[in-house]
Amino acid sequence: MDKNRITQLFGIKYPIVQGGMVWCSGWRLASAVSNSGALGLIGAGSMHPETLREHIRKCKAATDKPFGVNIPLMYPQIEEIMQIVIAEEVPIVFTSAGNPKTWTARLKAEGIVVAHVVSGSKFALKCVEAGVDAIVAEGFEAGGHNGREETTTLTLIPQVRRVTDLPLIAAGGIATGEAMAAVFALGAEGVQVGTRFALTEESSASDAFKQRCISLNEGDTILALKKVSPTRMVKNGFYQQVKELEERGASADELRELLGRGRSKRGIFEGDLEDGELEIGQVSSLIDAVIPAAKVTEQMMKEFYGAVKKLYILL
Ligand SMILES: Cc1cc2nc3c(=O)[nH]c(=O)nc-3n(C[C@H](O)[C@H](O)[C@H](O)COP(=O)(O)O)c2cc1C
């Protein structure tokens, strides 16, 4: 592929980013993705600061290619996390779940390339003001925490493209090269892929979680917990409890109490399929095998070229 702004910005071969994912994306997944020519991200969201340092060091040892760290900005020990990322000379940071103005200037002053994840064009404008290098626009098909407005990827990408010329990465519902071609047609220059990489061999999610997710059908995931933090998850026993509370008009505090601590760890990492929170995207219904991460990159690029060629021939 000819260089585009995303591959140039991150120094990678293919414009595919593996999204940071709690309990899935440690050094093993991030380095496998980076070694495949895409960009791997370590997900700091589920790590203690010192665990993150260890993952960064292991990732550096496992790849000589660029990799990054995803940092959800509501993280309680954010100062410590940022200091580690700076001290360890991580070249790329993807921030999410917060205001990009709080950290972008500081990170960029250290020579770090910064991308920020948004779910709507008004947040994209905040990224422009904050001076980020790239924007990730994530539609509500996506697994994990999500936007309140429920804007789908197909609608979101052109909306964001309309308000900014910054390098744009599309996320949400992208697991194939055909979907990648679709969002490129809408103005994206890269894709961030979560669900497909969560269900690979190198993902640190439990086997039980991976097997359950590859067996999902259309309609088996839903966006819940809107009063607390909108999250796309599997409709399992835990979701049924959330649903009952939500239907009774429960307050955010009641929902938070049900959620408790470590609900996503229990579901994703420990494989408690009934009482854990199983965060995964709609596109899981298209995935039917756990394969190596490098294969995902390879397949997606092959499908991408095939789709572009097919569209060209149709003309
Ligand atoms: C299990 C899981 C955990 C996630 N955790 C995070 C996270 O910690 N930080 C973040 O910014 N996004 C997180 N996401 C979102 C992904 O980074 C990515 O943007 C999203 O999965 C893309 O949509 P897709 O799932 O349809 O591929 C998570 C997604 C999943 C499936």
Image: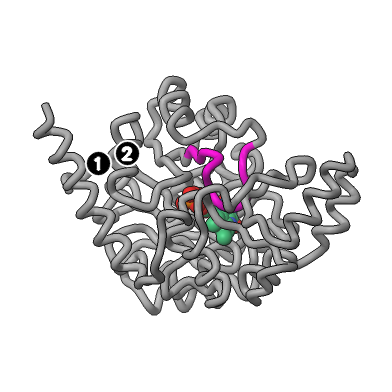
The answer to whether 135 appears left or right of 80 in the picture is left
**Image side of residue 94 versus residue 264, left or right:** left
Q: Please give the name of the residue rendered at 34% of the width and 65% of the height, measured from the top-left corner.
A: 34
Residue drawn at (63%, 54%), measured in percent from left and top?
Answer: 233
Helix or strand or loop: what does disc 2 sit on?
loop
Coordinates of residue 36 in the picture (x, y in percent) = 28, 66
**How are the residues colored?**
one colour
Counting from the top left corner in percent of width and height, residue 187 is at: 33, 30
Mark 1 closeness class: few <14, some 14–19, many ≥20 residues within 10 Å: some
Q: Which mark is residue 242?
A: none
Q: Are marks 1 and 2 in contact (CB under 8 Å)?
A: yes
- Residue picked out by circle 2: 189
Cβ of disc 2 within 8 Å of ligand 1?
Answer: no
Residue 64 coordinates in the image, percent (x, y): 32, 71
Whole-Å distance between the Cαs marked 1 and 2? 7 Å
Type of amino acid at the residue the image marks with label 1: Asn
The quadrant of the rendering that contains the C terminus is top left
Highlighted range, magenta: 137-147
**Front label number (1 vs 2):** 2
Decide if residue 48 is in sight here.
no
Q: Which residue is mark 1?
A: 4
At x 66%, y 49%, the residue is 231
Left or right: 15 with respect to 206? left
